[in-house]
Image (cartoon, rainbow, N blue to C red):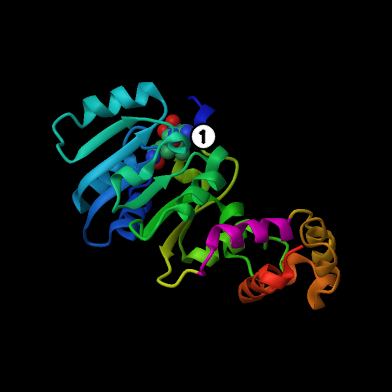
C-alpha cells in the first residue's frame, strides 16, 4: 500500500458522513475536495452539493476516479497539486479533505489566505496539528499556526479519529476541524500575519529579541518586550502590531 503522498484512506463510514455533514450542512452549492484518493469522502460529499471539484495529485487515482464516477455529472476531477493551484477559480465554495499530512500546514495557510467567497473548510489532520490550532496562550502548542488560524476563523473540533479508522493506519491519532471564516477580519491581515511570524521566529526568545531586527530600539521599549510570543493573546498581537506599525514607530 503506498504511503507516499500521505495516502491513508478513511474507511469508517460514520466518520466520512460526519465530515461531509460538517462541510456541507444539508446542502451547499459547490465544494472543493483536496486529495480525494479513491473517493471515500467524495461519495459522501456528492449528495450534499451541486458541484464538486476534486484535486488529486496521484495520476493513478485521477483515472480511477474518472472511471468510478463516470456517470456523475456533478464531479470534476482535476489532476492537480493543491499547493500549485489557484483555488479562487472555483469560488464561492467550501473546502473539504482528508489531508495529505505532509502538507497540512501549507494547505491550511492557503485556505486562510483566501477571501470570504470561501466561508468554511473541514479538514482531517494529525491530532497534534489540531491541538496546535486549538491551543490557548501560555501552552506549549500555542504558536504561529494557532494565531494565524484564529485571526481568520472560528474553529471547532468535529471529531477525534483513531488510527484504526484508516487503511493503512497512520502512526498518530487524527482530528477533523471545522474552520468558519469570521465576518470581521483585522485590517492589514498579511502584514499582521508577518508580524506574528516574526514574534514566533525563535519560540524561546523574548519578543524584544525577536522583533529588534525589524523595529530596532522601539522593540526595546515595548512594555511586553520581556514576554515570549506564546504568552500573548490574539487581541494583544493585534494591539502590539498596530503600536509598532504606527507612522512614528517605523525605523
Ligand atoms: N480522501 C481520501 C480518503 O479519505 O480515503 C484520501 C486521503 S489521503 C490522506 C490524501 C490524498 O491526497 C491522497 O489521495 C494523495 O494522493 C493526495 N495528495 C497528496 N498530495 C497532494 C497534493 N499536493 N495535491 C493534491 N492531492 C494530494
Q: Position of residue 214 (x, y in %)?
A: 77, 57
Please identify the dominant SS of the magenta region.
helix
Residue at 81%, 69% (x, y): give it: 218
Q: Classify mark 1: residues with Cα within 10 Å, few (<14), some (14-19) or many (20+).
A: some
- Vertical order, 139 against 61 (above or below): below
> Nearest the camera: 40 or 183?
183
Quarter of the image where one finds residue 220: bottom right
Q: Position of residue 180 (x, y in %)?
A: 41, 64
> Nearest the camera: 70 or 195?
195
Instruction: Report the image quarter containing ligand 1.
Output: top left
Report if residue 19 is visible in the image: yes
Specify the quadrant that holds the C terminus.
bottom right
Q: Which residues are magenta?
A: 186-200
Any magenta on residue 182?
Answer: no
Q: Position of residue 23 (x, y in %)?
A: 33, 57
Which residue is under mark 1? 6
Report if residue 3 is visible in the image: no
202 sits left or right of 78 in the view: right
Q: Position of residue 49 (x, y in %)?
A: 21, 51
Any magenta on residue 188?
Answer: yes
Amino acid at each position: 500500500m503506498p504511503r507516499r503522498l500521505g495516502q491513508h484512506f478513511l474507511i469508517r463510514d460514520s466518520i466520512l458522513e460526519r465530515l461531509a455533514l460538517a462541510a456541507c450542512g444539508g446542502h451547499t452549492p459547490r465544494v472543493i475536495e483536496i486529495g480525494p484518493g479513491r473517493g471515500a469522502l467524495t461519495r459522501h460529499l456528492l449528495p450534499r452539493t451541486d458541484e464538486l471539484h476534486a484535486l488529486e495529485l496521484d495520476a493513478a487515482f485521477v483515472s480511477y476516479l474518472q472511471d468510478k464516477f463516470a456517470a456523475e455529472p456533478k464531479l470534476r476531477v482535476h489532476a492537480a497539486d493543491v499547493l500549485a493551484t489557484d483555488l479562487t477559480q472555483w469560488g464561492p465554495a467550501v473546502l473539504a479533505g482528508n489531508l495529505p499530512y505532509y502538507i497540512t500546514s501549507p494547505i491550511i495557510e492557503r485556505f486562510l489566505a483566501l477571501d470570504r467567497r470561501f466561508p468554511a473548510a473541514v479538514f482531517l489532520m494529525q491530532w497534534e496539528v489540531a491541538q496546535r490550532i486549538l491551543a490557548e496562550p501560555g501552552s506549549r502548542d500555542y504558536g504561529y499556526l494557532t494565531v494565524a488560524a484564529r485571526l481568520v476563523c472560528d474553529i471547532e473540533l468535529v471529531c477525534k479519529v483513531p488510527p484504526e479508522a484508516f487503511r493503512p493506519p497512520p502512526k498518530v491519532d487524527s482530528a477533523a476541524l471545522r474552520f468558519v471564516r469570521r465576518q470581521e477580519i483585522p485590517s492589514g491581515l498579511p502584514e499582521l500575519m508577518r508580524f506574528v511570524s516574526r514574534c514566533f521566529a525563535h519560540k524561546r526568545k523574548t519578543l524584544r529579541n525577536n522583533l529588534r531586527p525589524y523595529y530596532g530600539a522601539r522593540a526595546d521599549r515595548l512594555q511586553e518586550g520581556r514576554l515570549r510570543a506564546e504568552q500573548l493573546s490574539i487581541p494583544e498581537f493585534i494591539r502590539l502590531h498596530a503600536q509598532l506599525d504606527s507612522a512614528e514607530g517605523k525605523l
